[in-house]
Image: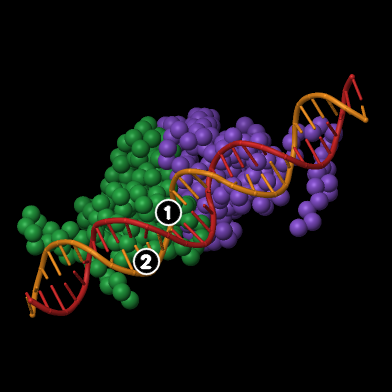
Chain colours: A purple, B green, C orange, D red
Amino acid sequence: MPTDKNIDLTISDGHASAPPKAAKKILDVAYDLFYRRGIRAIGVDEIVKRAGVTKPSLYRSFPSKDELAASYLRQYDLEYWERFDEAVAAHPGDPRAQIKAFLTRIGKRTQVADYRGCGMTNAAVEYPDHSHPARVVSEANKQELRRRLRGMAVAMGAQDPDTLGDGLLLLIEGAYISGQLFGLGGPAQAVARNADLLIEASLKK
Amino acid sequence: MPTDKNIDLTISDGHASAPPKAAKKILDVAYDLFYRRGIRAIGVDEIVKRAGVTKPSLYRSFPSKDELAASYLRQYDLEYWERFDEAVAAHPGDPRAQIKAFLTRIGKRTQVADYRGCGMTNAAVEYPDHSHPARVVSEANKQELRRRLRGMAVAMGAQDPDTLGDGLLLLIEGAYISGQLFGLGGPAQAVARNADLLIEASLKK
DNA sequence: ATGTATACGTACCGATCGGTAACATTGTCA
DNA sequence: TGACAATGTTACCGATCGGTACGTATACAT
């Protein structure tokens, strides 16, 4: 294989600062593989092969496969809140519209073949042990989601904000899971509609 | 086919007339291990060791580990619909109360330490490949759940029964997942309350 | 040019994975 | 007693698992 090491060293990087490039390629490939096929299903050999690097390179940047999985989820966490904040920013001061926008987006994303749900949720299912590095990241992400949803339920003026926030979380998690269980035409496409019904029923009258 | 169906009808009492069947012990142990710690996380060696049998015994009763996992889920399916039908039978002719009973039970089950959610859901997360034997069982179970919930939504007199049925399914799946993510005090304890709110908001007026 | 630090590659480790071959032992029933 | 089916015993297979010892190449500052 003529994988010349000089051709793709710089991926149109802005400046000449040189954080390790192998680490980025590894994390990118691991992200894709872990998300699509599951963490336990992917071996480190496949990661380094697809990344065009070698195993020692992986273990110089990451202490273990478990820690690589945690890094994958930390990256996932960043992008997750980016999407969340986009929905929030699109409707300033209107939490109900923010939720609707976020859920509509989720509902759309679930309606593609081979949708794989939420990487955080999936990782928690794969690693029941609460002390696993990947699970720690996953649980923190979900705690934060709960916190935000309950806060938005307060801002919406719900009679029982905690119950509404938790109800929205249940609908969201249900969408992630049933999206990958049912594929196209599944229940996840109804998540925004149901959330809006639930919100309507939960407001102070 | 060397292995017959081997459906147990062991009398299995204190007398020496019924040798405990290896297949049953294997399936019982696999059930417990697969459910609590995940299918991919458990090796066949651990199963046979805990079952007090040997590996050839496992492979005389089950063609492969994947098929053993499918058998585990078929057993899970049986017990799942037993619990479902119990809630239904407790409130004849009252689908709303049936749902409430079923969801109250789920909400309670989630409020224990180390709750592990739904074995069907977990298996689907562990095996994204739709052709995997375990996933086939899992998807069939969820299709049936969707069918029943939509039917009950019709019987409740919902304005849009399919939407309500799917909304209930999302809440249920959300409870399974968030139950194992949050543990005690998590959002899953609010599943019955939210389902009732959603039902109330979905009925014809 | 040379030292030094960093990035990378070759080759390998022991353990475990799912699965099997060949044979010995047991209990049951005819 | 003989036949049969189920299970146990031991040893083994190739593949893959996560992880590492150790030598080599490149970059840069002196």
Crowd class of label 2 (few under 14; some 14 to 19; many from 20; radius 10 Å): few
The residue under label 2 is B63
Residue depicted at x 6% and y 57%: B15
- Above or below: residue B169 compared with residue C27: above
Q: Nearer the viewer, residue A11 or B83?
A: A11
Chain letter of disc 1 in the image: B
Which residue does the image show at 79% across and 56% down from the upper left? A2
Of the numbered discs 1 and 2, the one sitting upstream in the chain is 2
Q: Which secondary structure, mark 1?
A: helix
Q: Which residue sits at x=21%, y=52%?
A: B90
Q: Quadrant of the N terminus of chain B?
A: bottom left
Residue position for label 1: B123
Where does residue B74 sit, x and y in percent of width and height? 33, 61
Residue kind at label 2, given as amino acid type: Pro
Reply above or below: A32 against B73: above
Q: Is residue B202 visible?
A: no
Between A101 and B181, which is closer to the camera in this rendering?
Answer: B181
**Residue name at image x 30 percent, y 50 percent:** B49
- Disc tally is 2
Place residue B13 in its image quadrant.
bottom left
Mark 1, residues whose alpha carbon is within 10 Å: few (<14), some, or many (≥20)?
many
State how far apart marks 1 and 2 are (Cα): 19 Å
Camera-near label (1 vs 2) is 2
Residue B64, quarter of picture = bottom left
* In this picture, residue B130 sits left or right of residue D8: right
**Residue A30, image x and y in percent?**
62, 46
Query: Looking at numbered disc 1 in the image, what kind of residue is underneath it?
Result: Ala
Element type where label 2 sits in the image? loop
